[in-house]
Amino acid sequence: MKTQSEVWSIVNALKELYPDSLCSLHYEKDYELLFAVRLSAQCTDARVNMVTPALFARFPTLESFAEADPKEVAEYIHSCGFYNGKSRDLVGCAQMLLNDFGGKVPREMDDLLKLPGVGRKTANLVRGDIYAEPGCVVADTHCIRITGRIGLTDGTKNPGKVETQLRAVLPPEESNNFCHRMVLHGRAVCTARKAHCDSCPIAPWCDYAQRQE
């Protein structure tokens, strides 16, 4: 288990390395982030960002999404994979946002989880990015892998357990941006194929890096 001082050292090293901890998905409206995260399941953010401009141009409002034929939506998101299920979720989500939440993306976790296709990862990202809620942990594949290597978690691959374990150790005000930085670090340094410990600024506090010496 990391000490509070070690956790802050890791957090601050990542902040210095990645000062702009922005979500890699492009969006202008709150619901567009919600939809983009749904599309990113089993798909890269880069691919989603290629698809959403045309999608959001064709369906520029929640009302247009709610009235859309899922088959037409599927044509725009085909390259994201699982397009039939995702298209149904986008249309159903738009309808529920309009009918149950006044056209606004809800803030509370329980309300977000009622929306089609929305799980805890999506809900945490929305709460952190849109509402700046403290303590939000987005346990995506990069976060799960890297925090396990570091020793911030016990190495479990279960997203729910990773979320719980990180909530217990991360400063709440830093947790959302920390998870964004995990994505950046997972692409640039601590990749799935190889951890480049020799060029990693958090190696001094990382269990995996210490074992490589």
Image: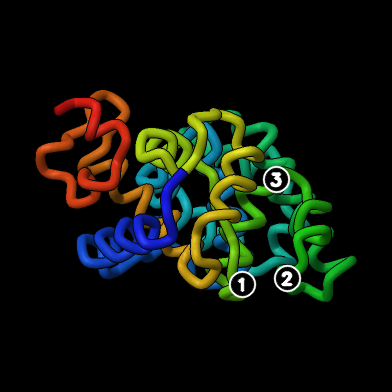
How far apart marks 2 and 3 lie (CA) works out to: 14 Å
Where does residue 179 sit, x and y in percent of width and height? 44, 54
Amino acid at dot 1? Glu
Where does residue 176 sit, x and y in percent of width and height? 50, 62
Q: Nearer the viewer, mark 3 or mark 1?
A: 1
Q: Which mark is residue 7?
A: none
How far apart marks 3 and 1 lie (CA) works out to: 17 Å
Check disc 3 and report the residue beneath it: 119
Question: First in sequence: mark 2 or mark 1?
Answer: 2
Whether 178 is drawn above or below 60: the answer is: above
Q: Secondary structure at mark 1?
A: loop
Residue at 32 percent of width and 35 percent of height: 207
Residue at 37 percent of width and 62 percent of height: 5
Amino acid at dot 2? Arg
- Regarding residue 95, the answer to whether it shows in the image is no
Q: Secondary structure at mark 2?
A: loop
Check disc 2 and report the residue beneath it: 107
Image quarter where the C terminus lies is top left
Residue at 28 percent of width and 59 percent of height: 14
Mark 1: give few (<14), some (14-19) or many (20+) Cα within 10 Å: some
Image marks 2 and 1: residues in contact by CB distance under 8 Å:
yes
Q: Nearer the viewer, mark 2 or mark 1?
A: 1
Quick check: 66 left or right of 99? left
Name the foreground residue: 37 vs 144: 144
Whether 124 is drawn above or below 70: the answer is: below
Q: Secondary structure at mark 3?
A: loop
Where does residue 11 sit, x and y in percent of width and height? 35, 61
Mark 2: give few (<14), some (14-19) or many (20+) Cα within 10 Å: some
Check disc 1 and report the residue beneath it: 133
